[in-house]
Image (cartoon, rainbow, N blue to C red):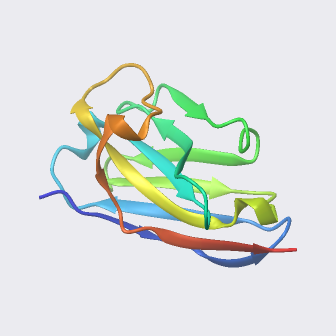
């Protein structure tokens, strides 16, 4: 059974940085694309960033492009989200997610593409 566990959330002032980590206890992590989504209070879950299984293709939401960086370490079964220049509107619960299918070449961006989800990590950005 796949278990994704996020860590690294917290409270930070606007303009600050945080790094989220997501560890995968399942096998064959390196065969799957990984993604990050977020959900703010009263809003729907939205796509943030995703990276293919090989790390060769990455896609970001327009709202975080240039500020956030997704990366992965297949030797550690971990995906990261480095968040810089944080804004109050980045406040949300952040979820990591694992693709439903192996070795997808294009970057999945829909929540329906992902089959396993973490429990979420709260990120709060104060103004």
Q: Which residue is drawn at 46% across and 36% down?
A: 51
Give the vertical position of 109 relative to 38 (above or below): above
Instruction: Residue lying at the far left in this picture: please name it.
Output: 1
Examine the rendering and report whether any part of residue 33 can be seen: no
Q: Which residue is drawn at 54% across and 43% down?
A: 47
Q: Which residue is drawn at 71% across and 44% down?
A: 64
Q: Which quadrant of the structure image shows residue 111?
A: top left
Residue nearest the viewer, comparing 66 with 114: 114
Where residue 36 sits: x, y (%)? 49, 49
Where residue 104 sits: x, y (%)? 31, 23
Give the vertical position of 9 relative to 95 (above or below): below
Tag count: 0
Is residue 14 left or right of 31 when viewed as pictured? right
Where residue 67 sits: x, y (%)? 75, 47
Which quarter of the image is occupied by the N terminus? Answer: bottom left
Give the vertical position of 71 relative to 40 (above or below): above
Which quarter of the image is occupied by the C terminus? Answer: bottom right
Where residue 60 sits: x, y (%)? 62, 36
Q: Which residue is drawn at 18% across and 57% down?
A: 2
Instruction: Residue lying at the far front in this picture: please name it.
Output: 42
Q: Which quadrant of the structure image shows residue 34?
A: top left
Is residue 75 left or right of 60 when viewed as pictured? left
Is residue 91 left or right of 95 when viewed as pictured? right
Examine the rendering and report whether any part of residue 15 can be seen: yes
Instruction: Residue lying at the far bottom in this picture: please name it.
Output: 11
């Amino acid at each position: 059974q796949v278990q994704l566990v996020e860590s690294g959330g917290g409270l930070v002032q606007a303009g600050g940085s945080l790094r989220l980590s997501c560890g995968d206890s399942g096998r064959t992590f390196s065969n799957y694309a990984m993604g990050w989504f977020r959900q703010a209070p009263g809003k729907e879950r939205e796509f943030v960033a995703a990276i293919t299984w090989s790390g060769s293709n990455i896609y970001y939401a327009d709202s975080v492009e240039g500020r956030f960086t997704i990366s992965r370490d297949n030797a550690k079964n971990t995906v990261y989200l480095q968040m810089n220049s944080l804004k109050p509107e980045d406040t949300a619960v952040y979820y990591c997610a694992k693709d439903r299918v192996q070795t997808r070449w294009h970057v999945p961006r829909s929540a329906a593409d992902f089959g396993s989800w973490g429990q979420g990590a709260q990120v709060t950005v104060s103004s």
